[in-house]
Structure formats: C-alpha cells, structure tokens
Amino acid sequence: MTETLERPLGTEGAQEQGTSAADAAADPAARWFADFEAALTAGDAAAAAGMFATRSFWRDLVAFSWNLTTVEDPAGVTDLLENTLERTKPRNFTLREPSETADGVTTAWYDFETEVGRGWGIVRLVAEDGASDGTDGTAGSGLKAWTFITALLELKGHEEPRGVRRPKGAEHGIDPNRKTWSEKRAEEEAAWGTDAQPHTLVIGGGQGGIALGARLRQLGVPALVIDKHARPGDQWRSRYKSLCLHDPVWYDHLPYIKFPDNWPVFAPKDKIADWLESYTKMMEVPYWSSTEATSASFDEAAGRWTVELVRDGEAMTLHPEHLVLATGMSGKPNVPSFEGQDVFQGEQQHSSQHPGPDAYAGKKVVVVGSNNSAFDICGALHEHGADVTMVQRSSSHIVKSDSLMEIGLGDLYSERAVESGVTTEKADLIFASLPYRIMHEFQIPLYQQMAERDKEFYDRLEAAGFDHDWGDDGSGLFLKYLRRGSGYYIDVGAADLVADGKVKLAKGQVDRLTEDSVVLADGTELPADLVVYATGYGSMNGWAADLISQEVADRVGKCWGLGSDTTKDPGPWEGEQRNMWKPTQQQNLWFHGGNLHQSRHYSLYLGLQLKARHEGMDTPVYRLQEVHHLS
C-alpha cells in the first residue's frame, strides 16, 4: 500500500504533480493504464475488459454509472463499459505517484477525468498465467486488474469554492445598500417555503443530515435540513448518559472540518452533540430545528414532492424536487410485543428512550438484548447501584476496543497512520477499494489475531455462559455491521461485568411479563422494576412507509445489507449496501445514513448526484437498485 500526502481536491495538473513522463514509461502500472486508456479511447469494451483478471472487481462511485455499483470479472466490466463508455469518455489516466509491488500485487493511485467530471482511484494489478508482472523491465503484458475503483471527486464547471476558488468574503468599495453577512443569512432563512423552495429536503438533522447539508452547501445546491429536535446534536444529548463513540476519532471526522488533534479518541455523547451544533453553524448548513415532517407525496408530472411539516407548532408545506431520508443507518425502533406488557407495574423503555441510570439505583432492571446498547446500559446501571440482568436471546460478537483499534483500524485510522501520510481521504478510498465480495477474506485473519490476543477474556466470558460468535464466517464486527447492522459489541468494559457475574446473565426468549417480572420461555422468572428493550431497529424504509406510504416503502425495498446470505442478510448478492447513497426505485427519493465515517465519505457521492440533477445534467443510472426484500 502506497502512502503519500494528499493533493488538493480537483485533479487539474495531475501529470505535473504525479509521475514524470520518464518515470511513467518505466512503471508497470503506467504501462497498464496506457493500454487501458487506448482501449477505452477506441471504444473497445472487450479489449479493456480483457485487461482484468479472471476473478476481478471494479467498484464505481458515480463516475461511470451515476450509481454506487460493483461489477465482477471481465464479463461485468464489459457490461459496464458497453453501457457507459460512449457518454463517459474517460481519459487522462495519470499516476499520482510511482506504483508499489508487494506479495505479487502492484498497487497504484491514479487520477482520471470523464466528460463531466474528475476523479481518482486505486488499482491493484496481478500477473496471471505465469506472465511477467513488469517489474523485471519486460513489457508486463501479464498484468491484469484485480481490484479497481473509480471515484468521482468533482463535476467540471461546478467545482467547490475551495483553495484558489475560495470566496473573497469582503465586498470592497462603497455600497449604500450593503447587506451584512448575517442579514443575508436571515433573508435566506426567511425565504424558505415562501419565496424559495429547496431543491433538496433532507429529513433528519443528525450526523448524516448535517454532513450532507454541508456538502450541498459547498456545491451550491439549495438544500434544507430539518429535524424534530430543538438543537442540532440533540439526537446525541437525548441518549443514555454513558453513550460515547466506540469508533476512534480518526475514523469519525466530518467533511471539511476535522476534529482538533487534541480531541479525545472516544468522545462522549454531549461533546459530540456540541460539535455537531457548532459545525452546523460554521458550515452554514440551512437547518430547521423543532420541525417534523408529517407526510410526503411525489407528483411525477411535476417532478417534485409535497411535504407537510409542523415547525414550532405551525403547519407548513414545502415542494422540494428531491427528498433525502437521513434518519440514521437504522429505521424505527423494534419494540417487541409480549403478553403481559399491559399489566407490568414497572417501567418499560426501548433503549432509544432510556434516560440513563440515575433514577434506578437499588432497582431491579432486566435488559433484553446483548449487543452495543444493551452492554452500555447494563454497565451504566451497574455502576449506579442497580441490580441488573441481561437477557441474551441469540449469540453476539464482542471485540475488545483496544484490539479493534490496533489490529482492525490502526493501519488506516490512527495516529501512526496519520504520521505515515495516510490522510482521512486516502484512508477512506483504501477502505472503499476493497470489494465487499472478498472483504471477509481479509477480515478473518485480523479477528483470529484478536481472538488469540484476548483469549483469557473470551474464556471467562464463555465460562460465564455467554454465547459468543465471530460472525457466520469468522469475519467479525465490520462484516456484521455491513451485512446486518447488529449482533456485536465493541467492549469498553461492560463485557467484563458479565464475565465476572456482576451483571447477571439469563438466556432464552421472553415468554411474557407479569406485574413485577419477566418470564422466559423455560419458566425462569426475573424480578424487575424496569425492563429495557435493547432490541434494535428496523429497515430505514420503515420511515418511508410512515411518511409517504407503504406502497413507496415496498417499491424501494429493504435498506442496508449486502445480500451475503448470512444471518439477517438474505441473498441474492447485491454487491453494495442496499439503497444507500444512490438512486432508488422511487424517483427522487434517497437514503443517507451510517456511522460518522460513512456519513462523511458517502455524503460526497450523494451530494454530487444531487448537484448533477440540480444542474440539469444527464444522469442515466446503470444498474438501478433491484428489490428482493421488502424489509
């Protein structure tokens, strides 16, 4: 893997900043790109596809497909090119730096452009059939692409106002009608819904909506972000007291403004909330708080939505062309239905409603669930003197935070990665360049290392009766997250409470509730003053069902998952996250969500797709998302 400092966004002058002509002539990747570009220029899709290995992957992020899509093997490459090459006109493939070869794989970073945009990517080349890999000075004709990613960075003529394009700000001279910055912002705010309509309405003002709002602002797309809470960041402030980020700071930056280098590795929820509120102001994201969308419908003839809102108690109507549901990676809370819930005399809460442990000292609490929220809540309740029992209904995967940071993320998102030249942008593209189809093959050895490193912990946990797993194929946390978005816990201490018996463990399905207890299917009775349902969330299209209609939700289908045919991720294989950050079967309806890393990285590609439509560009979608599952 090659690491160098990142060049600015925009790839003009790439040849001058990348490899020299003389160096390029000797570089096997440069020779591969010369042949590849020649085939593309000739319109010969078959010849270009023949430069891919028998088992190979091309992931395209908007640049060719106006979609997020992965094609496999030469046949898939041929299909992609036959459907996109004529209008895309890709050219000027230029190495950013000399390629590197290790373990039989030549890796190269490159820039390119199309008819409408500029992008960058990573190619990994391998030699097939015993042919030369080119490193011995021969022609290297045996080099073929194994993995290839093309990622759009900007649209020509619509570049962001950054660097040399930054706005001047000051208006020199004399103008008796001069308006201040704050006056202009106030006028813009007041015009929404009366004198102006947003091109894009983003429903959900958490990390995802705010990141996308910042992107659209810089791209010049008239967009409005709305949220039901009173302030940006309240989504975090309102959660249970002990909540903090489980991912490290290097993984969690937002677009444009990174966390300071003295920011804590794992930020507590209220600190994140304040950061999101400040970020919204600094990035001038048009943001309506205390605003709830109550219904939406799409007029195909007019090509716009009618969205009914209630803002600060007052009814309003907006007519955006595009609607983005940025309500988080997950959908509505899954609140189970059990016999006796109506007779239970204590409190019942979904984990999303849990206020924290303060009121429950000395109380008996039953937490139904054994993943992230369940462990966090159990740990905080125990810390405050509650008598806590966790009910495990199915096996869970647990990984120690320190082990995950060092072994799982350290090469890309850590201080040592930064010091070695791996910027956030480079780390994101390296991460994105590994095809989902084979990602588990690279994750399995990492989790085997973690299992060995923390063997004593896992032995104690399993001795306590906890059902632990490493994923269906041993690939651990990240694949569980991508496939199903559940079934794991990044341990920051609470798992030791279960292993040591300080948090009691009960196993089985809940049968019913009585006035003062939870009864499991085997008859075990657990006394309770409070029951917390840490039972997860449904698919994001559930929000579409509530806001628009069940018909539209079914037309879109299930959100999230890869179609891996593993637990809670039914096949067929999708190749990408279902319906996320890309066009759906419902015209002008989009879904945006995920963790902070995904909110940052994929907001760029969603923003560019929306910008292109705002400018009236032709955006034919290759391989529009198919629907195989409704929820």
Image (cartoon, rainbow, N blue to C red):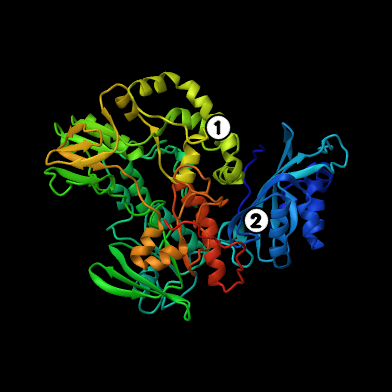
Quadrant in the rendering for residue 280: bottom left
Residue 132 image point, x, y percent:
84, 37
- As helix, strand or loop, the secondary structure at mark 1 comes to helix
Q: What amino acid type is highlighted by mark number 1?
A: Ile
Which residue position holds label 2?
Answer: 119
- As helix, strand or loop, the secondary structure at mark 2 comes to strand
Left or right of 331: which side holds 240? Answer: left
Whether residue 20 is visible here, answered yes or no, is no
Residue placed most toward the observer, 421 or 94: 94
Kindly identify the residue that appears in the image at 50 percent across and 63 percent down: 584
Residue 427 image point, x, y percent:
57, 42
Q: Earlier in the sequence, mark 2 or mark 1?
A: 2
Which residue position holds label 1?
Answer: 444
Image height of 570 relative to 219, above or below? above
Residue 242 image point, x, y percent:
29, 38
Quadrant in the rendering for residue 613: bottom right
Q: What amino acid type is highlighted by mark number 2?
A: Gly
Left or right of 465: which side holds 84? Answer: right
